[in-house]
Structures are given as C-alpha cells and as structure tokens.
Image (cartoon, coloured by chain):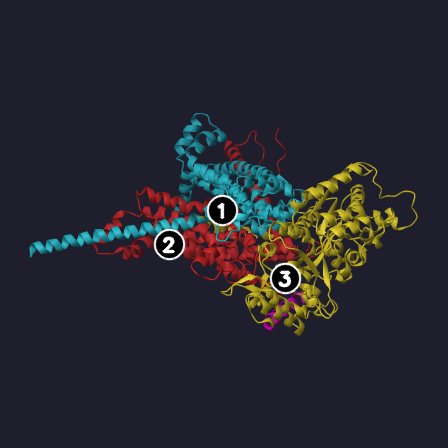
Chain colours: A red, B cyan, C yellow
Amino acid sequence: MSKKTPSSGTQVKTRGMNPKVKHAWLDFSFVVPAIVLLAIFTYYPIAEVIRISFTNWDLLKPEYDYVGFKNYKWLLTGTGGKYFMNSLKVTLIYTVGEIAITVVGGILFALLFNRPGSKGYTFMRVLTFTPRYIAMSSAAVVFLWLYDETYGIFNYFLGMIGAEPIRWLQDKYMAMVSILLLTGWRAIGYGMMIYLANMRSIPETYYEAASLDGANGVQKFFGITLPLLAPTTVFLLVTTFISSMKVFQSVDVLTGGGPSRATEVLVYLVYNYAMNKFRMDQACTIALALFAFLLLVTVATMKISDNKVNYDA
Amino acid sequence: MGKNSKDAVYSAELRAIRRRKVGKAIQTVVAVIVTLIMIFPIYWMVITSLKTQQETLLMPPSFWPEFGLQFENYITVFKKANFSKYYINTVVMTVGILVGQVTTGVLAAYGFAIGHFKGRDILFYIVLGALMVPIQVTFIPLFIMCSDWKMNDTYAGLILPHLVSAYYIYMMRNAFLSVDSSYIDAGKMDGLGRLGTILHVLVPMCKSTLITVTLLTITSGWNSYFWPKIIARAEHRRVLTIGLTNLRNTYAGQGNVNNHEIMAGAVMAVIPIVILFILGQKYMMTGYSKAAMK
Amino acid sequence: MKRLLAMLLAVVMVFSLAACGGNNDETKAPETKAPAQTDAPAQTDAPTAPEVNPYLVTEPITIKWWHSLETQYDELIAEIVGHFNDTNEYGITVEAEYIGNYATLNETLVSAQAAGTGLPAITVGGSNYVGNYGSSGMAEDLAPYVQAYGMDLTDFFDGMLKMSYVNDTLVSLPFLVSTQVLYYNADKVAEKNLTVPTEWADVADFVNASVEKDASGNVTFWGGYFAGWDYAYFLPMFMNQGVKLIDVENNTTDLNSEAAVNVVKGVQELVQSGVAQWAYGSGSSATMRKTFYDGNAMFTVHTSSLYNTYIDNIAQAGQFELGMAWYPGVDGRAETTLGGSSILIPAANDQATKNAAFVFLMYLTGAETNVKWADGTGYLITRKSVLDSEEGKAHLEAKPAFKNIYDNLSKALPKIEHTCYTDMGDLLKSYLNLIIIEGQDAQEQLDLLVEELQELLDEAAE
C-alpha cells in the first residue's frame, strides 16, 4: 500500500523502497535527535535573541511592543554603550591576562617541571595540576577566604614581610588581578601539561644537531622548542580566548562586577540586565553584540592561524 | 703540556657536570616551592574546614587545627544548609545530562561518520556551528522557553538544554572515522545491524575517546553554574555549585563569619570530581593532549 | 584543528542566514508575561454583598510562604507557622520556604511570575522591590480583602503603612520593618564620659575622642565603623543635609551639592586619618560586626533588625553593654528610611489560594504574632496597639534600647519611588568607596556620579 506521493517525488515510504534510499533514511534517523535538539535549544534561541532585541520587553511589565532599533541606538549612543564598552574593555583585559598566564606561565612551568624519569617531578606535576580538579565554585569561595581583608591568609603573609595589607577585591585595580590569580591558579597547570605533552614529542635528534652546532640551552629553546610548539600555543590561544570571553562565575562570586564596574565582564553585564533589572530587550541586545564579537574574533583567528601555523609539525 | 691540557679538559668537564648539578638542585628547590604555593589554597581549604569558628579568626593564624579536628563542621553544613538535597539535585542533573549527551552523541556520530545520506555534510556543519553559540548568549530565550513549559525549578529545566553536545558529536565522529572500514564490514558479515555495529565494533574500538569525552561531560555537568543559577533558584532544586556560593547568605545570614563551614561545603562539593579525576587520570591526560594535538 | 576552523567559518555564514530566516517565522504575538488581573476583587468593591464573602476560605488547603529569614530564625518560624497550622479554623496548612536574601527572593519571584508557575501563595518582599511588584500588577490589591475581613489598617504606624501603597493601591502590608540606627559600646561611652551624638556635626569629635592607639600608633579601638556595602546605611547622612537624592519632580539629583560634598569629606577625613573605618565589599559586614562584638570599635552604623544578633554575639565576645541610638541628624532633622520587608500576595494565583493567603497574612501581621516577631528578631513592632499592650510593655522592658527608636519612629519614612533609586544607591556606593577609602577628590567624583546618574534619569524619563 503506497501512500499518495506528492508530485515533487520525494518518497518517504519504506516498503518497496530502493534499498539504498532506505539505508539513507535509516542512517539519517541516527542524527535526527541531535539535530532536533540543537534546533530547539541552540538555533531557535538565537533567532529569539534577535527578535527580543527589537522589543521593549521588561519582564516586570505585563506586555511588550516592537520598538525597532531603539535598543541598538541605546547600545551605540545611550548609557548601554558606555557600559558595554566598559565591559568589553574589562573582558579583554581579563582575556589577555588569562591567555598570558596559560601560555607564558604554562611554558615556564613546563620547563621547570620537565625532568623525564624522575618520580619526584611526576608527583610535583600532579600536585601542580591539582587546582584544575577544584571546581570553580569551590575555588572561588576558597579564594574569597584567602583574600579576606582582615582574617585572610594572604594579607597575613604580606604582614609577615612587612607589607601593607592589600584590598584584594575592593580596590579598583586589584580586583581584576585577584580574579586573574584565581583563574590562573586553575589554568597554569593545564597549560603546563599541554606544553609538556607536546615538548616530549619533539625528536631528541633536533636538539643533538643543535648541540653539535654549539647552541646553548636558551638558543635551543627559542630556536627549536618554541617554534615547534606554535600549534600548541595557537590551540591554547584560541580555546582560552573563547572560554575567557564567557567568564562569569569567578566574577559573580568574588566581586559581583565591582568595585565601580572594574570587573563587570560582558556576560555579567548581560546577566545583570536580564536577571536583576529584568530588561530582556537590553540584555538580548548586549548578548547579540557579545555573540557578534565572538564570531568576528573566531573568524579572524582562523584567517591568521591558517597563514602562520604549520599544523603538520 | 699535553698532560696539562688533558687535565684542563677534564676539569672543565667536571665543572660543567658540577654546574649542571647545581643547576638541577636549584631547579628542584624552585619546583618544590612552586608546588607548595600551588597546593597551599587546597591545604588551607581543608584545614579551615576542620577548625572551630574562633580558630579561623585567630591572628596569627594556626596552620594546623589546634583545638582538634572539627569534623562536625561537615555534619552541620549537611544538616543546616541542606547539602544532602544539593547533592541529590546535582547527581540527578549530571546523570540526566550524561545519558542525554552519550545517547544523542554516539548515535549522531555514527550517522555522520559511517552513514550515507543526502545533506549529511550540511547537517554536520550545523552541528559544528552550535559549538560557537554559548549558552551565555542564548540563556534569555531558553529561560523564557523553560518558563513557558513550566520547567522552572525542575530537573527537566536543568537538563533539557544540555541533552546534546556538539563537542561530544564532533569528538566521537572523528573517533569513529578513524576505525578501519574493514572492521565494520566484518561486523556486517556477522549480521550486525547499525546499533550492533555501534555497540560491538565502534564503541569498543574507540573506548578511550569515549571515556575521555564522557568524563568531560560528567565534570562539566557537575560543575555547571551559569544555567542552574538561572533556572533552578528555589532552595529545593539548588545544585551544589549554587548552594555553595550561597552558603554565606543562606546559612549564616547576617549572623556570623562562617568560613569554616563554607570550606567544609567546598571540600564536599569537589570530592566526587576529585575521585573521578583520580580514577580516570589516564584518560583525562590523554584527552587533554589529544585535544591539543588537533 | 584547521579543518574544524574552516568548517566553523562555513557554518557561520550558513547559519547566520538561517538565524535571520528563523526570525521571520517567529513573529508570534507578544505573550502576556504577567497574568491578567483577576476581576474578582472588583466585584466586592460594591457594598452590595455582605451576605456572601467571596474571600472566605471554604476548603482545607495547603499554601506556600516564601521568606528571607535565615537559619537562625528557623525555630521561631516553625513556632509561628506551626501555631497557625494547628489553630486556624479553615484547615489551612502553610509551608514556609526560605528562598534567600531579598535580592535572591526578588529574582526568584519575578522568574516564577514570568513562568506563571511555582508562585507562592504569599511572600515576603524586600522594601526595595515592593514598588515594582505593585506597579507591575504582580501583587494583589489587598483593599477588598481588608474590607471584607474588617481589618483595621489605622493600627499600623503611618510611615509603614505608607510604604505599603503603590499609586494609591494597597499592594502589601508591613511585615518585618527596620530602620538605620547607631549601635554603640555603652561601657566605653561611660568610661570616656562622652555623649552619643544626635547631630551629624558632632560625629567627628565623637570619633576622635573615642579612638585608642597603642604606643606605635596602631589603632586598638576604632572611633567608629560605617557600613558602606549597602546604600541603605548611608543615605540618611545625605537626606538630613537636605540633599535631594532624586528630585522626582525635576528628574534631577543634587548629590554633588555643597552639602553632599561636605558630608562625604567629613567621613573621608575620618577614614583617611585612620580613626574610623568604612566597611565596603563582600565580607566587610561580617568583619565590621566581629570588630564591634569584640569590643574594638565605638559604634557601627547598621540596621535595627540585627539587635538580637548584636546582643547574642556581644554576650559571647566583648561582653559590654550595647546601646542603640537614632541616626544623627542635622539641626534636629533626623530622617531615616524604613527598610526590611512587606508581605504580599501574588495576583496570579487562583482565588482560593489568595483567600487562604490573606487569612495567613492577617495572622502574620496581627497584633499577637507581631510581638513574637519583635521579640524573636530585631525587627520593629508595626502596630500602635501592640506598643501600648501588656506584651508590648514587656517587650520594651526586655529591650529598653528600642524605646528611643519608637520615640523617633515618625521620622522614619518610606523610600522615594523611582525606577532609578537602586541605580542611584549603587552608584553612590561605588563612588563613596573611591572617595572615602581610596581618598579621591570628593567634589570631582560626585560630579562624575551626577553626570552618570543624570544620563540614567534622562533615559528613564524617555
């Protein structure tokens, strides 16, 4: 019994179907759950974010209207723009900081802890990596305690060496440093492990050849190790960049965006407009700007990295 | 003369060896100090969790609990701050996400790696595109959606948006692609269907990738913070990450400084993940380096 | 990696088109996010139906009550709710649920409102938020219920009752009300033979006379400790100088006026010269209290609601006598703002739930329960009749420090209703941190503040 088939000719029946077509449909059915879920929970919301950005939706008000580009105007010329630019700046500072710690710190740690065959060093590497295991939520409250102005151990240590106590989270400039210390504490061991794994894969013969040419350790590092680690560095750069643009939790727990918006990163700004001020429209507009920025940077990174890096190394 | 120069070479070599030895010693000293600094916060977390409230505020601070180990801090947090509830919620959420991502991920990976159908590549691009859409951008419509579906403060609300992971599909597809087609053909000869091929051929052969990616799914589920903070606010649906950061308000209120209890909560929140990491150490490490090699 | 990136690039284009396409399909009509106001209450405004009370609870029902009282009050809540559950004649069972502080409760409530599910039958609302609940139609108009049950509103203190109205609609009733006060170490005041200042102009002298330093110049006893982490605590400092935080009529602010600058400079000098502290940032509240409890500071500027906590902790720590004074004013003008919480009923619930909620509301705010709250917490008595009753007298005997507060209570006023009020407070908070702790120029920073606030005010007025 074949159903009526539309004139377009796409056949959806199974019986009497060409076995090849049948196989195709069955194969296709395996990706359907994933595609459907992605459509509902990833792509549809993006369309919604765009739609909401054209409304004046205040969750506290019973209704909303479409207001054209009002929110975009607000983002470009109103107070939204000022706070958005501030958040963009703050986020970029954070990003640069986290990348520097992961990449530079990672390489330094990799060099420091690199001693093949030593059980003691293996143990120390494991310990150094351990902070990665401490979830951000726990790590953040631990650092909150370490940073305590009066009873915190950090200020006690500073006092021991005769230094003035630091207002870790209340000072406009220190707050970002404090957040970066927390992030860095968790990230640096990760950077180290990734660099170590790739350093070990550099053939020993390269170094032997360099030794014969009379190169010293420093020259070998800059001449051989660093260039051959370039793909690793780019990998860390891109992944760290994308993850740090989305930073939220450490800021939420440690500073709440303060003091004086000095740590108000982009996601925190979006969250604040959405869940504290309940201005869904403004929050969506900022979220879109964040999204556009992420896309832009990803595309740019692709272009640059395609030219510069030899992936087959 | 000849003898002298020989001595000179010899002593130069000795000096070089000694210099290397000194260098190595310095390296070890620095490495030990750095390691100590790195683990200090963890030590301080554990040690504070075992102190009395009075002792946490001592100046100078004590580096070992001097008034006995206060294990009752843990019991207090469990009882007063409802930590048992947070635990259950976190476990249910994590298991839900895990089952969802493994099922949808493995199936889709098969479809994209082994299957043949029209539009396969375009659909795969669509999956990859999802990698670039973070929940931090889409959470507002998701929140509204879940609200419309009456899923605030429910497990469904916590889990649904995370049922599928593009990353999981991408990793498993690559793993499946690396399996030589002769194995799959051999399976077909033995009468294996699609699901049979996945279960008896592909999964066993890609075990390490599967475990690695699944471990990442578990940890990211367990540690998730942003979405639970938005969708599950009510006390009875709070997960550990949210409950923990709320300990300061929730439990102590305006009452007291309670860092000893907060630290006890912090320790309890990480223990399951630390155990998991230790058990899966091998896979986590290969996972990280594999990802780096990509 | 390269392949992945290349694919992503392709996808960006594909799906940015898809996203726009999707948007076109998605022009669904705006949904009503707040519930339609139930029409039921309107019927009863007409004085025609005394025979049938539509607000009567007819069947046993279980309802949820959301509150913000932390664990230290668990027993008190269990007692008060338990008593209601056992004794009410309607078979109402109340389940109390702690949600979080007022801010968390606000987020949770608005989320539930948007979701249209999971709303409590009755909830506490922080004083900063009640205005929003009222103007958005989220809170039920209580007037018909009050009328139906013959509740006497005039028994509430005037300022507190005023706080319960939004645009002349009664959207809440006073629940746990507090105001800013000055806690002081009465033993030290006596020892140094000082008087607690009632005028802001005398605060500096009081601080300087109180501070104690050791031989090497380190402070051992702080002259004063100001709460700077929440704007509620320092706003009276400006209000009493005649500073208009927000001039609602002209939509301006004069927070950079001479009076404002001078009052800030005064505190700045105290903090910068190292005789007083300005508590700012997370955890600073706990540190401030700990310092005071231990007997290491002369006074704190804080909220009356924590009176019991102060007493209990001082008994364990510094063991001195606690004094509580009204906020120092200017030339006898000593206004404060009312804080704490009101109690309200979400309008979106069905009538039976709302009816039961109102019965519980009457119990919670009733005279008998009110004095239990006042005894068990540091919050104020809200009813005039209670103050004059036997229980009220016993209450004041147990807490004589509150006498002073009730004498001044008429000076405690509701906050200004303005959408930018919270923005104003938060801005002021962060600028005061810059000025008072970091020592930046007061005039310069307050000018910047006014500039920033004015932009927000203008935008809100559009």
Q: Nearer the viewer, residue C268 or C183?
A: C183
Q: CA distance from mark 2 to mark 1?
A: 42 Å
Tag 1 secondary structure: helix
Q: Give the residue displayed 78% in from the left and 42% down from the top.
A: C353
Tell me the tag on residue A105. none
Q: Nearer the viewer, residue C436 or C36?
A: C436
| Horizontal and vertical percent position of residue C260 | 66, 70
Chain letter of the residue beneath label 3 in the structure image? C
Q: Name which residue type carries label 3.
A: Glu
| Horizontal and vertical percent position of residue B30 | 34, 52
- Horizontally, is A209 left or right of C137 in the view? left
Discs 2 and 1 share one subunit: no
Tell me the tag on residue C191. 3
Q: CA distance from mark 3 to mark 2?
A: 76 Å
Label 3 or label 2, whichever lies nearer to me, is: 3
Task: Give the crowd class for mark 1: few <14, some 14-19, many >=20 residues within 10 Å.
Answer: many
Magenta-drawn stretch contains A167: no
Q: Are marks 1 and 3 in contact (CB under 8 Å)?
A: no
Chain letter of the residue beneath label 2 in the structure image? A
Chain letter of the residue beneath label 1 in the structure image? B
Magenta-drawn stretch contains C448: yes
Q: Nearer the viewer, residue C146 or C307?
A: C307
Q: Name which residue type carries label 1.
A: Met
Task: Give the crowd class for mark 3: few <14, some 14-19, many >=20 residues within 10 Å.
Answer: few
Q: Which residues are magenta?
A: C443-458
- Horizontally, is B55 left or right of C422 in the view? left
Q: Name which residue type carries label 2.
A: Val
Task: Give the crowd class for mark 2: few <14, some 14-19, many >=20 residues within 10 Å.
Answer: some
Label 2 or label 1, whichever lies nearer to me, is: 1
Residue that badge 1 annotates: B45
Tag 3 secondary structure: helix
Q: Nearer the viewer, residue C164 or A86?
A: C164
